Image: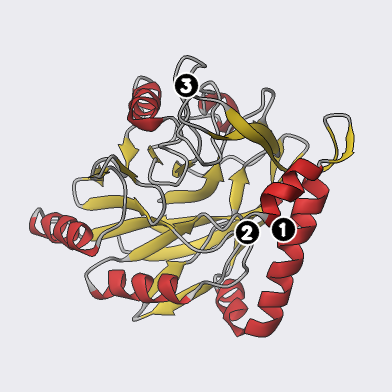
């Protein structure tokens, strides 16, 4: 059995976990391990931190870490390569930059819909031709189970969008057994499609609030501060337990990250709870999304850096 965790960015020291996965596990590694000598990628939010050993948090190292996400190229190709080296130097395989064979007949792939290209070269970016080729290669090599991690969707939106639904079903139609989604930073519903599961978003696993310089120019000068003070819905996540030997979903564990500690709030929850989330009213979901977006912005930029409110952040937001 392998357990899939959500987005992880080990940005703080002293992080701990009372939740210990039962056996093998993997997660989405959503930051870059670099020093200040590297120049940040211009025009985006750049997240970096020294590498923190997963074994010190979870009691054992992960079976693999997914590096297909919108932050893995925050410091360019050099930053990407240094991050992969930092992970693999610990004996942990990466998936996204390469096909990962978890076992002789279990293939795991990973892709992002955002910021996965560098100077015209596809590093971890999703493209149907590339994905179809890699799925077919895995099947030809004897894969009995194919798992795909997808970095997609809209941040803080509680439902999958049309693109997620179409791509998730396309993956199942083309031979994938289970789809594991990341990026929205909140839990999204699960769909059962043709007797296979599409987890549109597992939510955050360990992702502390952050306050970083961002939107660098070509000279390496930051033009604003970007802050995120996560709310309760961002601190919730689920862990997916999957038996790859028989392509069977076992259950999910419900997690919560707060005060630098990851806890399990409920174990072995039936997936039907998350399938039923699909019945959410789309209009109410959109209203909730607008509230979340602006409430997060207001809270994140209030009482920071000696200011009651950072109006420079508001000016930048209005210029979008």
* Nearer to us in this view, 23 or 135: 135
Q: Are marks 1 and 2 in contact (CB under 8 Å)?
A: yes
Which residue is pictured at 67% across the width and 76% down the height? 285
| Location of residue 198 with respect to 130 vertically, above or below | below
Instruction: Decide which of tag 1 and tag 3 comes sooner along the chain.
Output: 3
Q: For the residue labelled by badge 2, is the local secondary structure a helix, a strand or a loop?
A: loop
Q: For the residue labelled by badge 1, is the local secondary structure a helix, a strand or a loop?
A: helix
Q: Residues within 10 Å of mark 1 (few under 14, many from 20)?
A: some
Which residue is pictured at 68% across the width and 68% down the height? 289
Q: Position of residue 265 (x, y in %)?
A: 72, 53
Q: Nearer the viewer, mark 2 or mark 3?
A: 3
Which residue, given by chain and number where applicable, does mark 2 sit on? Answer: 186
Which residue, given by chain and number where applicable, does mark 3 sit on? Answer: 34
Q: Indicate left or right for 166 with 264 as reference.
A: left
Instruction: Decide which of tag 1 and tag 2 comes sooner along the chain.
Output: 2
Q: Position of residue 198 (x, y in %)?
A: 43, 69
Colour pattern of the rendering: secondary structure
Q: Indicate left or right for 302 with 243 as reference.
A: right
Q: Could you say which disc has been placed on residue 233 in the image?
A: 1
* Nearer to us in this view, 58 or 246: 58
Q: Are marks 1 and 3 in contact (CB under 8 Å)?
A: no
Which residue is pictured at 11% across the width and 55% down the height? 137
Which residue is pictured at 25% across the width and 52% down the height? 106
């Amino acid at each position: 059995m392998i357990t899939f965790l959500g987005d992880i960015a080990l940005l703080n020291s002293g992080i701990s976990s009372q939740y210990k996965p039962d056996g093998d596990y993997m997660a989405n590694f959503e930051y870059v391990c670099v020093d200040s000598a590297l120049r940040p990628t211009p025009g985006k939010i750049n997240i970096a931190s020294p590498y923190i050993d997963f074994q010190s948090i979870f009691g054992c190292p992960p079976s693999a870490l997914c590096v297909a996400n919108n932050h893995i190229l925050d410091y360019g190709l050099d930053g990407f390569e240094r991050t992969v080296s930092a992970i693999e130097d610990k004996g942990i395989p990466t998936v996204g930059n390469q096909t990962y064979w978890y076992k002789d007949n279990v293939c795991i792939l990973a892709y992002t819909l955002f910021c996965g290209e560098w100077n015209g070269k596809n590093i971890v970016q999703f493209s149907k031709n590339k994905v179809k080729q890699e799925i077919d290669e895995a099947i030809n090599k004897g894969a009995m189970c194919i798992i795909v991690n997808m970095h997609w969707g809209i941040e803080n939106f509680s439902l999958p969008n049309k693109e997620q639904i179409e791509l998730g079903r396309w993956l199942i139609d083309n031979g994938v057994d289970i789809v594991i989604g990341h990026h929205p930073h909140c839990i999204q519903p699960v769909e059962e499609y043709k007797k296979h599961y599409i987890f549109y978003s597992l939510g955050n696993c360990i992702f502390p609030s952050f306050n970083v310089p961002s939107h660098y120019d070509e000279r390496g000068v930051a033009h604003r501060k970007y802050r995120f003070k996560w709310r309760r819905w961002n601190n919730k996540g689920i862990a997916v337990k999957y038996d790859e030997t028989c392509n069977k979903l076992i259950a999910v564990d419900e997690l919560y990250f707060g005060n630098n500690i990851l806890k399990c709030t409920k174990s072995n929850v039936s997936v039907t709870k998350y399938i039923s989330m699909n019945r959410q009213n789309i209009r109410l979901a959109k209203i909730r999304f607008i509230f979340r977006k602006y409430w997060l912005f207001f809270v994140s930029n209030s009482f920071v850096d000696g200011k009651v409110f950072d109006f420079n952040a508001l000016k930048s937001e209005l210029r979008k």
